[in-house]
Image (tube, helix red, strand yellow):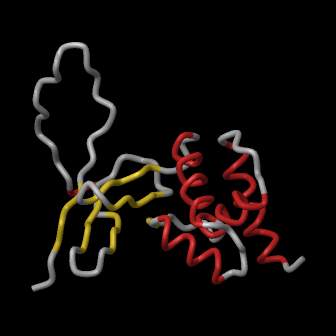
Amino acid sequence: MDGAIETTAKRAQIWLSKAGVRPTRQRLALAIALVGDGQHRHVTAESLYEAAHACGDGVSLATVYNTLRAFCEAGLMHEITVDGSKSYFDTNTHDHPHFYWEDTGLLCDAPEDQLEIARLPDLPEGAELASVDVVIRLRRT
């Protein structure tokens, strides 16, 4: 096995094993596409499906959706919903804001050190804060 390919596969295997996710062939193929190079990704199910097929990995779109859900449940990814209808999946699980480019549909990280949230509204009784998602929508001028 080529050294770079071996490192990519090993990185993906470690990512899955840290969360206790069983590395099926499909999960491993998708994990390689997501974290094999060590970089974070913002993907849609469709873009991950296309990336997997471009690498010769035959996975169905339904398998991609199911795998992304399993990765989110295991804490490997976060789902970010834009417009209530389009979901992105982020491999960076730390709290951070995002830029969403309306013209291209691109979602990317925004500088977290520049975001200040001074105060949140009081939570209803019996509720606890799960997360605060910040998506800053942009248009080109």
The residue sitting at 73% across, 45% down in the picture is: 17
Query: To which quarter of the image does residue 102 belong?
Result: bottom left
Q: Tell me which residue sits at (78%, 75%) in the image.
A: 5
Q: Quadrant of the N terminus?
A: bottom right
Residue projecting furthest to the right: 1
**Residue found farthest to the top:** 126
Report whether 54 appears left or right of 23.
Answer: left
Up-down: is 20 above or below 101? above
Locate residue 99, reporting x and y percent. Answer: 26, 66
Q: Nearer the viewer, residue 8 or 27?
A: 27
Horizontal arrangement in the rendering, residue 2 relative to residue 113 (left or right)? right
User: For this view, does 34 lie left or right of residue 20?
Assistant: left
**In front: 136, or 103?**
103
Residue at image position (27%, 47%) is: 133
Q: In which quadrant of the rendered image does the C terminus lie?
A: bottom left
| Residue 130 drawn at (x, y percent) | 33, 32
* Residue sitting nearer the eye, 47 or 116: 47
Image coordinates for residue 35, horizontal then vertical, percent? 61, 64
Total marks in image: 0
Q: Give the residue displayed 58% in from the left and 40% down from the top.
A: 74
Q: Position of residue 60 (x, y in %)?
A: 63, 67
Placement of 128 over or under 28, stated as above or below:
above
